[in-house]
Structure formats: C-alpha cells, structure tokens
Image (cartoon, helix red, strand yellow):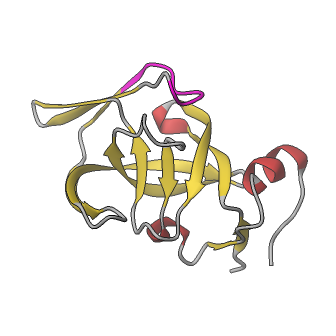
C-alpha cells in the first residue's frame, strides 16, 4: 500500500457530521484527532453535539446525536490533561472515505477547527510541511502526489 503525501493544512469533508470543506491542521505532535464542538450535552445515554462556530468557516449550526461514544484523556502541548468525549466518524481525504476517531473540544479560539493526529495518519500518509491543501487540490484538480 502506497502512502499519500499530505501537507501541513488541508480542507476535508466529514459527511456524517454534515461538515464540508473544513479547514484542518495536520498535527504530528497530537496523537488523537480533535474537532470543534460548540456544545456537548450528555443525556439518556446519548451525546448531543452542536457543531457551530462564528469563527470557523463552514461550521453552521449542525446538531448530531451519538449513541456510541467514550471518554479519553488528552494531554495538550503544554502538558495539561483533559478528559474529553470521543466519537467515531468518517472523513474524506483524496476522495476516499476513512474511519476516524475524534475527540470533542471547543476550538473557537484556535486557528483551525480540526486537528488531524498521528493515530489517523499512521500507515496512510506522509506529511510534507512545505505543502498545503494537497487532498483538496487533488480532489478538485486531479493531481497525483502518491509515492
């Protein structure tokens, strides 16, 4: 299996979350991937998530209820540990749909609403920090960056 080259930032789709053309940062320093969620309500053994942002492009008010979710500890770059909800979803890179684990976090104060971490990248992608929007450009312009 050949690995695809991905740049340091991209625009990707999360079809099951109703989020399309979302700016993401490829973060090899992060183990898990994280997505902005403006409101999280746990009730009746389900998780109601509202994906909304005035700061992040293409984050309209989307509400999704998850029946399958878990919690996990995430350590930030400054060493602070946070217990977050984790969901399973799908993401589209290079026109292909992949399964992805996402922790939920309020990221309005961050430049990117989504971080893609090592857990997702491993065995599929190589990161070239000189490149940007490789998947987006490949999907919409049909360039090939496989090695």
Q: Is residue 28 above or below residue 83?
A: below
- Return the x and y of residue 116 as percentages of the image width and height: 51, 58
140 magenta-colored = no
Dividing the picture into quadrants, the one containing residue 45 is: top left
Question: Residue at horizontal 77%, vertical 66%?
Answer: 130
Quadrant location of the C terminus in the rendered image: bottom right
Q: Is residue 84 left or right of residue 89?
A: left
Question: Residue at horizontal 49%, vertical 53%?
Answer: 115
60 magenta-colored = yes
Q: How many marks?
A: 0
Single out the residue that lies furthest toward the left.
44
Q: What main secondary structure does the magenta stretch of the protein show?
A: loop
Single out the residue that lies furthest toward the front.
78
Q: Is residue 93 left or right of residue 55?
A: right
User: What is the magenta range?
Assistant: 55-63
- Return the x and y of residue 41 as percentages of the image width and height: 19, 30
Q: Nearer the viewer, residue 144 or 108?
A: 108
- Return the x and y of residue 88 as percentages of the image width and height: 37, 51
Q: Is residue 43 above or below residue 26?
A: above
- Return the x and y of residue 1 as percentages of the image width and height: 68, 80
Question: Residue at horizontal 25%, vertical 46%?
Answer: 68
Q: Is residue 84 above or below residue 36?
A: below
Q: Is residue 82 left or right of residue 9?
A: left
Q: Is residue 5 above or below residue 112?
A: below
């Amino acid at each position: 299996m050949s690995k695809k080259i991905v740049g340091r930032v991209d625009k990707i789709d999360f079809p099951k979350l109703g989020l399309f053309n979302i700016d993401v940062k490829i973060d090899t320093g992060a183990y898990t991937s994280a997505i902005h969620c403006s409101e999280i309500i746990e009730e009746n053994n389900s998780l109601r998530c509202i994906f909304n942002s005035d700061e992040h492009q293409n984050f309209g008010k989307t509400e999704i209820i998850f029946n399958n979710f878990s919690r996990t500890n995430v350590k930030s770059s400054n060493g602070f540990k946070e217990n977050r909800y984790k969901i399973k979803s799908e993401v589209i890179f290079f026109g292909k749909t992949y399964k992805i684990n996402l922790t939920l976090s309020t990221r309005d104060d961050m430049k990117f609403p989504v971080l893609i971490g090592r857990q997702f990248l491993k065995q599929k992608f190589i990161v070239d920090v000189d490149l940007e929007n490789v998947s987006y450009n490949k999907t919409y312009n049909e360039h090939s960056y496989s090695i």
